[in-house]
Amino acid sequence: MGAALFSLAGCGWLERAERPAWRAQAENYCLARDLVKPSAYIEPQPEIDGPGICGLTHPFKVSALAEGTVAVDKNVTIGCPLVVALEAWLAEIVQPYAQADFGEAVVELEAFGAYSCRSVDNMYGAPLSEHSFGNAIDVSGFRLASGREIVIVRDWKKTGSQEATFLREVHAGACQHFTTVLGPGADVFHYNHFHLDLAMHGSTSTGPRRYCRPNPPPDLQPPPGRPDGLPPAPDLDEPMDVARASMRPDAGPLDLHGPSAAIPPPVAFEVKPAPPPVLPPDDIDGAPTSAIPLSKDD
């Protein structure tokens, strides 16, 4: 009987399965192309293997991006492809809109966290989150060069304000660089942050399938791609490439990824016209599907 039992140590997963091969392939491809340069701000770390299938082959500890000009308010552990996506989002979306809306640059990302061996939204019985593979980050706000803070839980719902406009612009732009983008209004768990990840949702004729919620307003959506005849993007974290795992019964209450606060209802909002962000180049030939985040979704 003992041989039939699986270890309940670590995160408490009840089964051990193979980590999907595409994850290591994506990391290796990113490193082979020198898409991330190790530095004092982006430091290679030893492999994380488990518990269960959690972990990364080549994790990086990140304390700042954009050659050290944009700090992260706490060190985060993420994979090489996610570093690339964050760098592109900052350069092509966040900084241009910050200059257009405020006349100054973003100098810090505020984050709830990144790598964490846990289920989706810490819910009992849910699939493993992309956080379990260093393939996701939760961004809660931005700090400008003047010291001004743009905080998602506070400013998203300030209808008509500069802050709310900026947040909707960078949320919409994130949908071009990540395969999953979730923000306030997506569900009750994301009222206070943007969840950004590079989950694999399959492919379309125009690139990886993407999941972006809430839907960006029409003036911030990229032009539609060539019709591919595929159904809409799947629901969150479709368990197509991760093992289902149960949390311990004593795992505690749900974690809403940040300080507790009243969850506001979704807010209708009109976004003023803004200069379109620079679209990233086409995916590099030969990259594993959604391995290199040079385009968009969850």
Image (tube, rainbow, N blue to C red):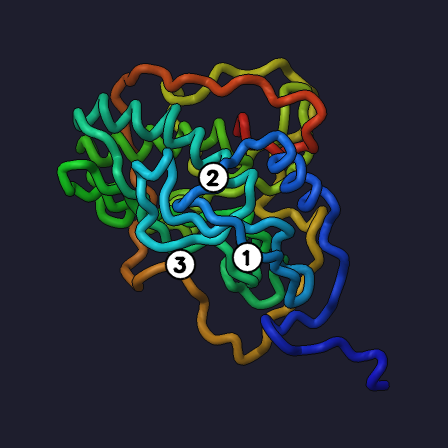
Q: Is residue 130 visible?
A: no
Q: Secondary structure at mark 1?
A: helix
**Sequence-wise, which precedes: disc 3 or disc 2?**
2
Q: Residue at x 47, y 39 (%)?
A: 181
Q: Residue at x 29, y 51 (%)?
A: 264
Q: Residue at x 24, y 35 (%)?
A: 164
Vertical arrangement, residue 32 with respect to residue 283, above or below: below
Q: Position of residue 202 (x, y in %)?
A: 68, 34
* Residue toward you, 138 or 108: 108
Tell me the kind of residue under disc 2: Val
Circles 1 and 2: CB atoms closer than 8 Å: no
Q: Is residue 67 visible?
A: yes
* Residue toward you, 188 or 98: 98
Q: Which mark is residue 120?
A: 1
Q: Which residue is mark 2?
A: 181
**Sequence-wise, which precedes: disc 3 or disc 1?**
1
Q: State which quarter of the image contains the C terminus.
A: top right
**Real-space Cα distance between discs 3 and 2?**
15 Å
Q: Position of residue 111 (x, y in %)?
A: 36, 51
Q: Which residue is mark 3?
A: 257
**Sequence-wise, which precedes: disc 1 or disc 2?**
1
Tell me the kind of residue under disc 1: Val
